[in-house]
Image: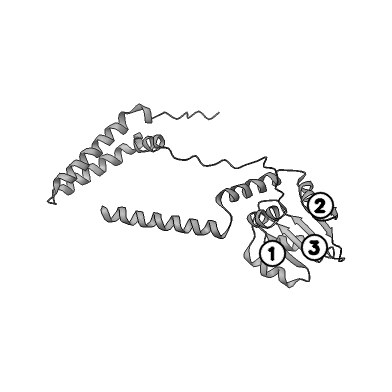
Amino acid sequence: MVSIFVTAFIYFILYLIKRKKKNKEGLKIKEKEEAENMFLSLACNDKKMDFFLKLASSKHKNVKKYSKFLVISHENNTKTLLFPKMDFEPLNISNFIEIYNKVKGRAEKVVILCHSYDKEVLSFSKHFDIYFLIFDRFETYERLYKYYNIFPEIKESYKKDKMLTFKDFVAFSFNKKRAKGYLLSAFLLALSAIFVRTTIYYTIVATLLVVFAVISQFNTTFNIKEDKEIL
């Protein structure tokens, strides 16, 4: 029993270290949530191109908006095209080719924003004369929104998972569905006590499990009936 707790504690410490390291390397947890919700908000917005026009115009004078992309003309006679692919399908080679056919000949550099992308797209994009930059939703947040210090308004957001409270834990532990499991465990412990010397510990735990089974079976507080009528 002690070894189980020690192992669990070690895994917990390693998890915290790994999580802290991840946060240092990339976005913080809160920023990742914002990035997710900003992408969702833009995906649900029919006027998303107006936001990107505002963002690009904050640093560039000559910006032209089209229905699917922006073209920025620089003073050195080069152009950069911004193509926001604001859907939830990962960017793959097939739809990369579709984008390429729409933008070729319009700019020397093309920046594609997407929800996520297949890794092979990055290497595939290097075979073209156009210089491509591809950002997923988190890279867009870090390298575009934070750089320009302009962020999309969050009008839509994912529902956060409810934190498990002590009351929820008790309700889960003493639900009627757990009664049979407690009784079975108590029976196995009582049976095991016959073959070991320290029977007192097995007896105490088995008794506790029987008590848990009784509470789970007859405590109405944690056994709320579900409404089976859907409509």
**Placement of 103 over or under 31, stated as above or below:** below
Horizontal side of 89 relative to 26 (left or right) equals: right
Please say which color scheme the image uses.
Answer: one colour
Horizontal side of 158 relative to 189 (left or right) equals: right
**Which numbered marker is on residue 135?**
none
Q: Which image quarter is the C terminus in?
A: top right
**Which numbered marker is on residue 57?**
2
Q: Secondary structure at mark 3?
A: helix
- Front position among marks 3 and 2: 2
Residue at 19% of width from left, 41% of height from top?
A: 204
Q: Earlier in the sequence, mark 3 or mark 2?
A: 2
> In the image, what residue type sits under mark 3?
Asn
Q: Secondary structure at mark 2?
A: helix
Residue at 81% of width from left, 66% of height from top?
A: 108
Q: Which residue is mark 1?
A: 93
* Circles 3 and 1 in contact, beta carbons < 8 Å: no
> In the image, what residue type sits under mark 1?
Ile
Q: Residues within 10 Å of mark 3 (few under 14, many from 20)?
A: few
**Placement of 2 over or under 165, stated as above or below:** below
Query: Residue 162 location in percent, x, y?
Result: 49, 39
Horizontal side of 143 relative to 4 (left or right) equals: right
Mark 2–mark 1 Cα distance, whole angstroms, equals 30 Å
Q: Which residue is mark 3?
A: 101
Give the quarter of the image for residue 27: bottom right
Give the quarter of the image for residue 144: bottom right
Q: Residues within 10 Å of mark 1 (few under 14, many from 20)?
A: some
Query: Residue 84 location in percent, x, y?
Result: 74, 54
> In the image, what residue type sits under mark 2?
Ser
Horizontal side of 82 relative to 204 (left or right) equals: right
- Front position among marks 2 and 1: 2
